[in-house]
Image: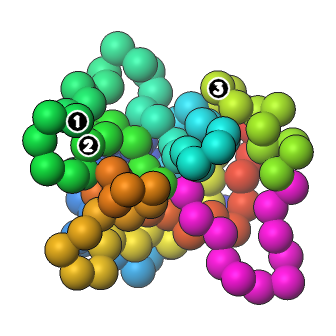
Amino acid sequence: MMRNVLSVNEVIDRADELDGKPVEIVGLLTFEFENHSLGHYPKAERREITEAADPPYYQSSVWITFGAGSIQPNQEMLMRWHGKRVRISGVVCTPQGSFGCGHFSGWGCEVEAYTIERL
């Protein structure tokens, strides 16, 4: 277990510094069609969605990705946890190239999750 648990906003603000490093992030899980992400908690501290501007649109959300190994996420369970507070352990990745991460490149960084724990 890692010492520092970060908020989503902290991960976004420090994405370049954290790129390729393991982290623990706490936030609200979104797990639905075309959106697997972790939103900042508490909601009152979220930054505005900037859909009118260039990506990334989601300033208080990180995209969640899963490796291609033999262990894959339990999608049924994660759908039940949609909207719930979770802790993700994983590795932060910044976008490769000029695009963002996730669906339509809407996120500024992603976390490759290796565990997701409901809080």
Toward the top, the furthest residue is 44
Q: Nearer the viewer, residue 89 or 33?
A: 33
Above or below, comparing residue 73 to residue 37 in the picture: below
| Location of mark 1 (residue) | 51
Residue 60 in view, yes or no: yes
Left/right placement of residue 101 relative to residue 14 reads right
Along the polypeptide, which appears first: circle 2 or circle 1? 1
Image quadrant occupied by the C terminus: top right
Residue 86 in view, yes or no: no
Q: Residue at x 44, y 21 (%)?
A: 42
Label 3, label 2: how many angstroms apart (C-alpha)? Answer: 20 Å
Label 2, label 1: how many angstroms apart (C-alpha)? Answer: 5 Å
Mark 1 neighbour class, 10 Å CA radius: few under 14, some 14 to 19, many 20 or more: few
Query: What secondary structure is the stretch in magenta mostly built from?
Result: loop
- For mark 1, give the secondary structure: loop
Q: Residue at x 41, y 80 (%)?
A: 20
Above or below, comparing residue 6 to residue 93 in the picture: above
Give the magenta-colored segment's residue range.
64-74
Q: Residue at x 78, y 38 (%)?
A: 79
Please check the rendered image and state whether residue 73 is part of the magenta-colored stretch, yes or no.
Answer: yes
- For mark 2, give the secondary structure: loop
Which of the 4 quarters of the picture holds residue 15? Answer: bottom left
In the picture, the disc for residue 57 is: 2
| Location of mark 3 (residue) | 83
- For mark 3, give the secondary structure: loop
Asked if marks 3 and 1 touch (Cβ < 8 Å), the reply is no
Q: Residue at x 31, y 25 (%)?
A: 46
Residue 45, x across and y down, in percent: 31, 21
